[in-house]
């Protein structure tokens, strides 16, 4: 039995669902009818860990979709970002080795799921903004929160050339919330962050405040 339990959060801004990763069935006929929406089934000869996370994130998506929409399709934009054929709904998906999730909202939204890993200590100079170095450098827990937030923000802003180190910095990190600033292409965004946890997994939902 998985050590992780499902997470479901619903508020006036978004609905979030995270599920323990499970193996993706290899029956293509089953997969075609697995969800309430249509989707493009990935090639089954890909890495099984990737396929499992990919499938579970889409299973989570099925649980947050509105029940009153008769015909929903999961599509991709030219950059590969997932989107729905529903004009007033925005989604973001994320998956790792243990947990996968989906969030749906009426405005741009970003989701990421991470766990602490030593690699973040090795690459911290590549993603820490100068204003973050003093309180985050060498602290794996803080680095995990920053990395997860910046991944979620990257999905939220969805602009080419956005640099984790140069354009995004976290002003505040609390247990359940955070505040980030993005300066990019002569625009400034104030980003509100919500954090959730499942064992060692850090889940971040990012949304624009201004």
Image: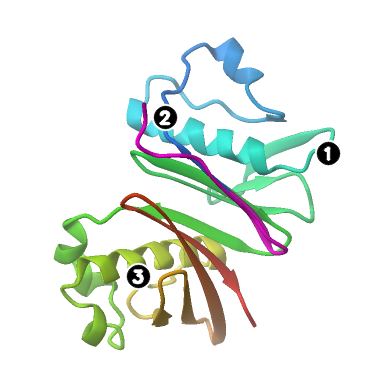
Q: Residue at left 39%, top 81%?
A: 169
Instruction: Give how far apart the Cα atoms at labels 3 and 1 are.
Output: 36 Å
Q: What residue is shown with label 3?
A: 146
Q: Which tag, 2 or 1, sits closer to the chain's start? A: 2
Residue 4 lies in magenta, yes or no? Answer: yes
**Of 158 and 176, which appears nearest the observer?**
176
User: What percent of the width, then of the height, locates residue 121?
Assistant: 16, 65
Asked if the residue under mark 2 is in contact with the one under mark 3, i.e. CB atoms within 8 Å, the reply is no
Q: Quadrant of the N terminus?
A: top left
Q: Is residue 32 left or right of residue 7?
A: right
Asked if the residue under mark 1 is in contact with the one under mark 3, i.e. CB atoms within 8 Å, the reply is no
Say which quarter of the image contains residue 5.
top left
Q: Which mark is residue 69?
A: 1
User: What percent of the width, then of the height, locates residue 34?
Assistant: 62, 22
Instruction: Give how far apart the Cα atoms at labels 3 and 2 are.
Output: 26 Å
In magenta, the rendered stretch is 1-16
Q: Residue at left 54%, top 75%?
A: 192
User: Does residue 158 appear anywhere in the picture?
Assistant: no
What's the colour scheme? Answer: rainbow
Q: Which tag, 3 or 2, sits closer to the chain's start? A: 2
**Of 19 and 86, which appears nearest the observer?**
19
Q: Is residue 154 left or right of residue 69?
A: left
Where 98 sits versus 111, above or below? above
Secondary structure category for the residue under label 3: helix
Q: Which mark is residue 52?
A: 2
Instruction: Give how far apart the Cα atoms at labels 2 and 1 are.
Output: 27 Å
């Amino acid at each position: 039995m998985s050590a992780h339990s499902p997470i479901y959060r619903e508020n006036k801004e978004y609905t979030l669902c995270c599920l323990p990763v499970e193996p993706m069935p290899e029956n293509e006929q089953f997969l075609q009818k697995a969800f309430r929406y249509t989707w493009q089934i990935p090639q089954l000869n890909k890495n099984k860990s990737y396929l499992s996370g990919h499938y579970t994130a889409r299973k989570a998506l099925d649980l947050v979709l509105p029940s009153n929409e008769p015909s929903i399709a999961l599509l991709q934009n030219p950059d590969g970002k997932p989107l729905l054929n529903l004009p007033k709904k925005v989604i973001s998906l994320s998956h790792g080795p243990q947990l996968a999730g989906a969030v749906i909202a009426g405005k741009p939204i970003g989701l990421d799921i991470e766990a602490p890993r030593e690699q973040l200590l090795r690459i911290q100079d590549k993603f820490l903004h100068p204003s973050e170095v003093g309180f985050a450098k060498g602290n794996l827990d803080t680095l995990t929160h920053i990395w997860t937030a910046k991944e979620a923000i990257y999905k939220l802003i969805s602009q080419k050339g956005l640099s984790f180190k140069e354009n995004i910095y976290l002003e505040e990190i609390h247990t359940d919330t955070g505040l980030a600033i993005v300066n990019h292409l002569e625009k400034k965004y104030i980003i509100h962050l919500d954090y959730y946890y499942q064992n060692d997994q850090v889940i971040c939902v990012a949304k624009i405040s201004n």
